[in-house]
Image: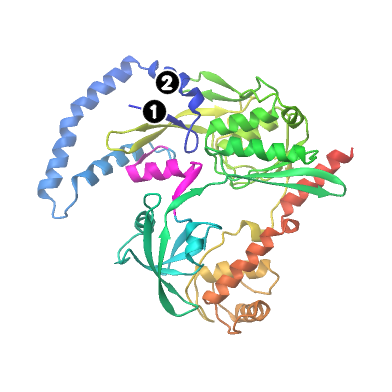
Amino acid sequence: MRRSRFFVFALLAVIATGLFLVLDGCSSEKGKNADVAMKEMFPVINEAYNIIQENTVYQVEGDRLIEGALRGMADTIGDPYSTYLSKEEAASHRESLAGEKLGIGAEITRSGGKYIIVAPVKGSPAEKAGLQPYDEIVRINGEPLGGMTLQDVVKKIKGKEGTTVSLTIYRPDLGKHLELKVMRDVIPVKTVSAELMEERGKKFGYIALTMFGDETAAEWKKATDDMIAGGAEALIIDVRGNPGGYLRAVAKVAGSLLPDDSIFAYMQNAQGQLTPLVVEPSEKFSYDKKLKNIPVVLLQDKGSASASEVLSGALKDLRRGFIIGKVSFGKGTVQDTMELSNGGEMKLTTHKWLTPKETWIHGKGVNVDLESEQDKLFTEHIRFSTEVYAEGDYHEDISYAQKLLVGLGYAVDREDGYFDESTALAVHAFRVDSKIPTENIMDRKFFASLRERVENYRKDKKNDVQLQVAIGYVHHLLSN
């Protein structure tokens, strides 16, 4: 059986051998007795399977019964991070951290029972074929979507590189159906974005990491080289909303910032034994030397979890960086993922990870050095709706819109989802400002314009309160 180490989704492959030795060396007499007892239970499991298959009035495929039993065993542990993954789910998890994805490059959502294109990725096959936001997918290769789940729809659209998928879409703006053929292709997944910024005569690099994936280390290397070459005197690292990823990627990022041979975290097994994790030696270039010495500020929030907490914990404990934002999520456990013969995987929590000062942050998070509240328009999840709401209606879509309207400066008396008179007046004022038909209703045009206004607001870094605090602190450091 091949094993791969996952942290959040996957653990560091470099230390996998050491963990194998720990796991293989942990057998005890108690464990052997448990194995014997389990083997004695196998006939009972087989008996239950046959009874269900032969007697239930509800037809259930045998494979689903087996998967249900596997899922039930994982659920019995009572650990939210220990779970059974079907073959499809396991593939999705692996793909989520891959350096590239195969498909058409479009975000799809389900709204009001319809499958809607949220947005095509810039330069993707979907954009080249002419797909637009709010296009409703009606058929895939001539097959209607009735009864399909969102996962089914996405699965049908995916396929082999170089093949085409035919989509019948309904475009509301035209009021008619269109037939589009989209060529499936490899879509690069970028996890690092960087910008050289200058404030009051001081240059610094802003680098955002959305997760720690396959290509993150290489992307980080290029981004930091560019920042240093451009004259950056400090770095702002943004891991807000970063759910984690491969620990090997964290090791390389941390290794570029910390002295060689630094311990950036510890692994602790069930017996309490600690294994130090040492940063990977950085390449001996002049840029790398500068990177290890320039001031570092890290931005985090409650969405910064697991692998991103390893980075913030290391920078904090080793006094290599100043942390601004909010306390992080607090995930201090490690999952060991093992493949099963049916193509699925069993993901189990097998270790804890601790910071360099041997602190377990699970359920607590990594504390910040300077707390900063974010603008509410940055924390509200952008939703998608094709429904129509008017005064007197009540819905969570209305509550969502009320919150965004308030954030944009419109006067609304309530945010509980009830469409009252003040909401109607705010909607009317917003529609006038957005140059869309001035009705006192929330419809597709209203939600599309609201989304665009909020996205444009977020793009302006001057509206990012936490980033502005970080910029102010960096300027303070460089001015002293």
Label 2: element kind: helix
Label 1: element kind: strand
Residue at image location 59% in from the left, 29% down from the top: 251
Nearest the eye: 285 or 107: 285
Residue 234 to residue 172: above or below: above
Nearest the eye: 259 or 21: 259
Region rendered in magenta: 82-103
Task: Find residue 473 and report its horizontal and vertical position in percent.
Answer: 81, 44
Q: How is the image coloured?
A: rainbow
* Label 1: how many Cα within 10 Å (few below 14, some 14–19, many 20+): some
Task: Find residue 388 and report its horizontal and vertical position in percent.
Answer: 49, 77
Please state if 167 lies on the left or on the right of 423 as rendered.
Answer: left
As shown in the figure, which amino acid type bears the numbered disc 1? Arg
Residue 384, numbered circle: none
Please state if 313 lies on the left or on the right of 4 as rendered.
Answer: right
Task: Find residue 171 and report its horizontal and vertical position in percent.
Answer: 46, 74
Residue 431 to residue 249: above or below: below
Residue 151 to residue 33: above or below: below
Residue where numbered disc 1 is placed: 3
Marks 2 and 1 close (CB-CB < 8 Å): yes
Please state if 418 lies on the left or on the right of 457 as rendered.
Answer: left
Residue at image location 70% in from the left, 52% down from the top: 373
Q: Residue furthest front?
A: 162
Residue where numbered disc 2 is placed: 20
Q: Quadrant of residue 350?
A: top left
As shown in the figure, which amino acid type bears the numbered disc 2? Phe
Q: Quadrant of residue 45?
A: top left
Is residue 86 in view from this perspective? no
